Structures are given as structure tokens and as C-alpha cells.
Amino acid sequence: MLQLKKKYCKFCGKDAIVYIGYANLGLCREHFIRFYENRIRKMLEKHRISGSLMVCVSGGKDSMSLLTAIKRISEDTDLDVYAFHINLGIPNYSDECESIVKGYAKQLLVPTIVSNLKKDIGFSLPEIISVSRKPPCAACGIVRRWIINKTAYELGFDFVATGHNIDDASTFFLKALMTQDYYSILRGQWEFLEPKKNYRLVGRIRPQFYLSERENMLYAQLNNIPIVDKPCPYSLRATIHKYKKAWSTLLEINPVSQINLTKTLMKLRKMMTIEEPMLYQCKNCGYPTENPNGICSFCRLISRVNKTLHNNS
Ligand code: FES
Ligand code: ZN
Ligand code: ZN
């Protein structure tokens, strides 16, 4: 990031502190912050996000930067911002995340909603993972998606925002291409999903979809945003990291390659007429599922956890 190929800020001529390769831009501190917040503002405007917005915040650099930028943007728009945090119950990790998120949201004057897995659904993430057959991050994703949607729906939010970035999206696609995972190429990753109120599905936006991890980290550093500086202990085992490493070489060859790969697949998707998956209402919890048998993946997972842990106790 700090390999200064442009020494001066494109907008004011001061010394540049960063070179944005994909845009061939040198930027000073002030103009980087403006550039970053403008990218987020444009994404919110493009999808006409207004009214109450629940920002999901884990405590990491992406979501903490997202909350900061959205809070600033809300000051001259009609956005009403709330932070939402899930305490996953991971020892030596989750309580620290919760306290950093709560403390910082308070400083920003953003109301915070916290869900505690153990209290709210009866099991912590480590308990769920101990009996799930899925990789930890997959099980965690199922639980988090369900809780985010349920909380937002019950509290009457129009949209939720999450902190996914271009490294996440492009790595997901790279892995899907390398493993012939057509379903993920056609369905996975998106910058925006429309709400479907009759299915109790809240609208979802990823305002940092085309921003990189490094930009999020720089924004956090320049604004003195506190962040949880250790990774989730389960994420270290995920194979996706191996694909992520490949990007550093590809970005050396072409700094726009992550954005181009992602945009290419998005365009191809639009050019194809893909039928929307049928949605059903889960017979157990009432939230949406693509499973025609009518039980959502969250309920299937929790019923398995329930049976295994309670039969063993
Ligand atoms: Fe979900 Fe780590 S945060 S597995
Ligand atoms: Zn400048
Ligand atoms: Zn369900």
C-alpha cells in the first residue's frame, strides 16, 4: 500500500501517504479519508439505502471502519444508524470483541444491539462447532446470517450492512472457479440483496464490496479506530486463506485484477437469465429457506446440536 508510485496527492498536491493501485491515485491523509467515505456513500446511494440501518460489527478493521464511515455519512443524510454485535462465546476472544465494539459505538454515539449466542439460542459457537459436521466458518456463517436477519426483522430495520470487502469477494470467486463450484459463482457474493418482506427477509448491503482490506485498515489507522487485533481462532484453519495468498502475486501483475474478476463474474451473471431460487418459510422458525423440505439450515444445525449435547448430558 505504501509503495508510493505517485508521490503527491492527486487533489491537493501535498505529499501522498498512499498509492491506490487500481485507481492509479496518490492521496494525502485528508483526501484518502474523503475518497474512502465517498466510495461508501456512493454504494449506499446506488442502492437507495435510507431510513434505519443496522450495521453488523464484529470488532475487526472492516466492520469498525464501516461503522465509522456510515456514522459520518448519516450526519448529512436521513440514515438512522445502529450497531449490531454478536457475542459468539469464544473463550479469550468474544468478550473482548464485545467490549471494544460497545465502547467504540458509545464514543460514536451509535446505539448498540448485542446478541449473546449462549443466552439467545442456548449454545455458544464452540459448542455448535463441536458437533457440527461443517467447517467452523460455515457453521458460524449459518448462525450469524440467521441471527442478523431475525434481529433486524424483529426490530423493524429496513436494511443491514456488513463489512465484506473485495479481498473476501474475489477470493471466494477464485476458489469457486478453481473448484468448479458453479453454484457459488452464480449465487454467492453480491453487493446488495433486496428485502423480501413477505418472507421475513431484510435487505442486505455490503458497502465495502469494492474496497480492499488494506484500505479498510488504513482508514481505521488514520482515524484511530480501536480494533480487535487478533483473528478469530477458527478462521486460521480456513482453506480460503491459501487462495487469498495467491492474490498478492496477481495484484503485482495487475492492481485491478481483484475488482476486474469480481465485476466480470457479476456482469456474466446479469447477462444470463438465472432463475431466482424459490424461497420457502421454515416450518420451525418462520424465517426464509431455499430448502423445499421446509426446515432452514439454522434449525437443522441447532436441532443436531440439541440432540447431541442434550443426549450426552
Ligand atoms: Fe465465525 Fe470465526 S467469526 S468462525
Ligand atoms: Zn490531498
Ligand atoms: Zn428455521
Image (cartoon, grey):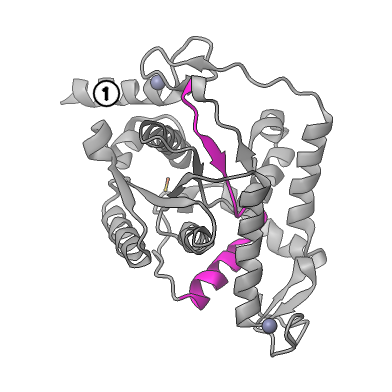
Specify the quadrant of the image occupied by residue 230.
bottom left
Outermost residue, top side: 293
Q: Which residue is rendered at x = 35% and y = 65% of the image?
A: 104
Magenta run includes residue 130 = no
Q: Amino acid at mark 1?
A: Asn
Q: Position of residue 225 (x, y in %)?
A: 43, 71
Q: Position of residue 203 (x, y in %)?
A: 54, 35
| Position of residue 83 in the picture relative to residue 309 (left or right) | right
Picture quarter with the C terminus? top left
Q: Nearer the viewer, residue 81 or 116?
A: 81
Q: Is residue 142 above or below residue 200?
A: below
Q: Position of residue 70 (x, y in %)?
A: 51, 58
Q: How many labels, in total? A: 1
Specify the quadrant of the image occupied by residue 176.
top right
Outermost residue, right side: 271
Specify the quadrant of the image occupied by residue 282.
top left
**Residue 45: in sight, yes or no?**
yes
Q: Is residue 30 above or below residue 49?
A: below
Q: Which residue is rendered at x = 76% and y = 40% of the image?
A: 266
Q: Is residue 18 above or below residue 91?
A: below
Circle 1: element type: helix
* Part of the protein shown in magenta: 199-223
Outermost residue, left side: 313
Ligand 3 resides in the quarter of the picture at top left
Q: Is residue 130 above or below residue 13?
A: above
Which residue is label 1 attached to? Answer: 306
| Position of residue 172 in the picture relative to residue 23 (left or right) | left
